[in-house]
Every structure is written in C-alpha cells, then in structure tokens.
Image (tube, grey):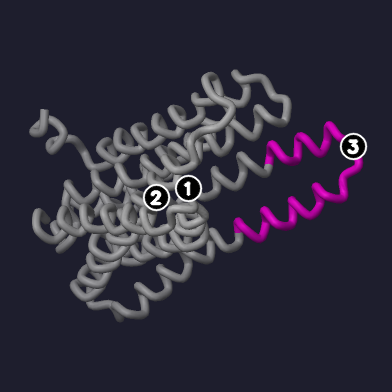
Amino acid sequence: MDNLWINLHPVLQAFLATLFTWAITALGASVVFFFKKVNKSIMDAMLGFAAGVMIAASFWSLLEPAIAMAESLQMISWLIVLIGFISGGALLFISDKIYDIVKKKKKETKTQNHSRLKRCFLLVFSITMHNIPEGLAVGVAFGSLGYHISGATLAAAMTLALGIGLQNFPEGSAVSLPLRREGMSRGKAFFLGQMSGFVEPIAAVIGALLVIKIQMLLPFLLAFAAGAMIYVVVEELIPESQSNKKKDVMAFFTLIGFSIMMILDVALG
C-alpha cells in the first residue's frame, strides 16, 4: 500500500490528500445531525494541535525548501521568499476586509430574510476563502516532491495534510451549526458546511500543477503557502484555542503538534 502511494503522480497524491481534508470538513459539518453544539475543549485542543503542525510545516516544509530552491535557481532567495510570504498573508487579509465590508452591509439590512441570507453567505464565504490557500499549501507540498529538495518529503506533505484536516473539523461544524441556528434545515446546513471544504482539492491540484509545470514559481508558491498558513494560525487558530479557560493545556497541544511535525521533517525527513 505504501509503495502504491509513493508511485502515484504528485498531482494525484495532492488531490487524494485534500479529499481527506474535505472529508474531515464534511465530518465536522455532520455534527449538525447529532448535536446542537460540540464540546469546546475538544474543538480548541484540535485547533491548538493543528496550529502547532502548521507553524512547524510553514518553516520546515515550505519556507526552508523555498529558500533552498531559490538559491539553486540563482534567485535573490530572501526577496522571493519575502514577496511570497507577504502575498500569502495579504490574500487572507484582503478576504477578511471583504468579509468586514459585507458584514457591515448586512447590519444595514432591514429585511429579516435578507439578513439571514447574508449571515449564511458570510459563514460559508469566510471559511471557503481560508480553505483555498490551505489546499494550495498541500498541493505545493506534494508538487515539490519531484525536485528532491531539503525539507520536501512525503511524510512532511502527508502530515501537513493531516494538520489541515484536523483544523477542518471544527471549521465544518462552525458553518453547519450556526446555519442550523439560523433556521436552515439540517440537510442544507450540512451541505453548505461540507461545501466550504470543496475548494481544497481544486486548489491542491492547481498548486501541484503550477509547481510541476513552472519550476521558477516553486519558491514563490512555497513561501506564499507559508504566509497564508501563518496568517490563519495567528488570526484564527491560536486566538480561538486560547479562548478556552484551560489556556495552558491548549498551549501544550500546540507544542505537541509543533513537535510531531518537527520530528517528521527533521528526524525522518
């Protein structure tokens, strides 16, 4: 089974890996059929763990290979990585600003039905926008395997997909449960919740293809994915996990996630 996976084309590997992350999103969205709310401590622990994985992956699986690749291509490594890193964060920063604009317009709406539709749109839009660079990050990680550069390993790419998948579970429920509270049927709430993760396989395939077809883009795309992931970690995952009354425990889960990813990248890479 391991040999079968290793022999798959990197684009197919990226697609299958993000089908897993999408499935976890759907699993998170499915709680709408069973619960009105989910235990916050469990959710926060998963977010803290995922944050640690994504922080470690941002350096060892994305930034370090980006620098090595840029140097091998005789680029100004620090400049290319800086531009890519800032661009990745800027994409999510812009998406947050769009979210704020739409939210402001929603508050000005007087019609209840229209307001409800706006809230539904905001929920799905915000999660979906954050899932695009996450899918891209997985695609870039798998697509870079063909270049045999330092830090770009199958174990690291798969662990990155696992970390993103774990934080997709609370994201799926974060969409479906509020939609249910808005009066939407369980079926529709689940459908929209899982659809927020549908963009990840698409983005992963695009990321992997770009890396494979246009080698010069690899350093930029690796850094871009790292910037997007760090933005998500700092802006969403850590603040949400630290909103738990057991902050120290949640911080320890972040350390565990970071340590596991570090071991896979450094010791086993």
Q: Earlier in the sequence, mark 2 or mark 3?
A: 3
Residue at (39, 46) in percent of width and height: 45
Task: Find numbered disc 2 in the image and state the secondary structure of the residue it sits on.
Answer: helix
| Number of the label disc, if any, that sits on residue 185 | none
239 or 167, nearer to the observer? 239
The part of the chain drawn in magenta is 95-121
Dominant secondary-structure state across the stretch colored magenta: helix
| Number of the label disc, if any, that sits on residue 132 | 1
Estimate the x, y position of residue 227 in percent, counting from the top left: 42, 64
Residue 174 as seen in the image, left or right of residue 53: right
- Residue type, label 2: Leu
Q: Contact (CB < 8 A) between labels 2 and 1?
A: yes
Estimate the x, y position of residue 71 in percent, counting from the top left: 22, 75
| Mark pair 2, 1: CA separation | 6 Å
Residue at (54, 24) in percent of width and height: 35
176 or 1, nearer to the observer? 176
Residue that label 2 marks: 136
Circle 3 or circle 1, nearest the eye: 3
| Mark pair 3, 1: CA separation | 32 Å
- Residue type, label 1: Ile
98 or 73, nearer to the observer? 98
